[in-house]
Amino acid sequence: MTQAASSVPTPTARVPRRTNPGALARLREAAAGCRECPLYAKATQTVFGEGPVGAELFMIGEVPGDKEDLAGHPFVGPAGRLLDEALTEVGIDRGKVYVTNAVKHFKWEPRGKVRLHKKPNASEIRACHHWWEEELEIVRPSMVVCLGATAAQAVIGPSFRVSRQRGEIVELPWGMPATATVHPSSILRADPDRRHVERDEFVDDLRAVALHLAR
């Protein structure tokens, strides 16, 4: 079980990087056959994390969406495009970011011809816990950004509330700082008259991350 994270008023020291892409490849191969919760039965495939070992930034979302499930890659749908744009805007190279999800299989329900995303439950999140923990231990980033409440509560702790604590920096048991913001998909679901405001706030959160990494 993950230990509780503690608040830190100043940035933590940089964590020495591991460079072991072979370990990550073996983990990805193992995850491809995961049957640890029922979600695999309706998903097209496991959607594992992607990015370089030693990436400065590790971003973790909730669960793959429809586009990610079909493509087998994280953050390639509309929310991923919004994330790409926001990262570019604040000067963070997406190619140097490791992106993953707290749950590796798409959870959905049919709505006509559409596969509608469903929020994973506690047992499904627990079943996938060790996958992202092992990703984190191999990548050893300088900072973790949780996208949305599911990721924040899985990684930082169940008492963390993005609505009250977004942007707050805490230290994880692995020795690196973490923060949380909204998931980009929530911006896409916002009312049109609020969407630009929420996008600007999201960009501001990522700009603070970029400044933290530059210290």
Image (cartoon, rainbow, N blue to C red):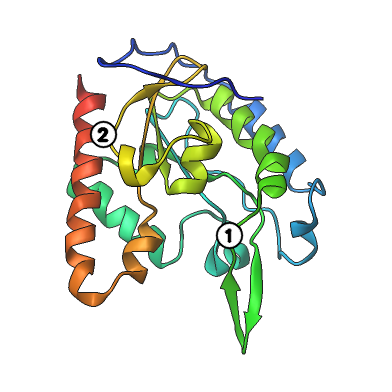
| Residue under numbered circle 1 | 119
Name the residue type under label 1.
Lys
Disc 1 residue crowd, few under 14, some 14–19, many 20+, Cα 10 Å = some
Q: Pick out the residue farthest to the bottom.
A: 112
Disc 2 residue crowd, few under 14, some 14–19, many 20+, Cα 10 Å = many
Relative to 38, residue 25 above or below = above
**Nearer to us in this view, 197 or 15:** 197
Compute the Cα span from label 1 to label 2.
26 Å
**Nearer to us in this view, 2 or 29:** 2
Relative to 70, residue 88 above or below = above
Please give the name of the residue rendered at 62% of the width and 89% of the height, measured from the top-left corner: 112
The quarter in which the C terminus is drawn is top left
For residue 209, the mark is 2
In the image, taking residue 60 as reference, residue 204 lies left or right, namely: left
For residue 147, the mark is none
Label 1's element?
loop
* Image coords of residue 157 (percent x, y): 51, 31
* Image coords of residue 138 (percent x, y): 57, 24
Name the residue type under label 2.
Val
**Nearer to us in this view, 155 or 77:** 155
Please give the name of the residue rendered at 82% of the width and 49% of the height, measured from the top-left corner: 35
Please give the name of the residue rendered at 79% of the width and 50% of the height, measured from the top-left corner: 37
Of circles 1 and 2, the one toward us is: 1
In the image, taking residue 176 as reference, residue 132 lies left or right, namely: right
Relative to 23, residue 80 above or below = below
Label 2's element?
helix
Relative to 211, residue 10 above or below = above
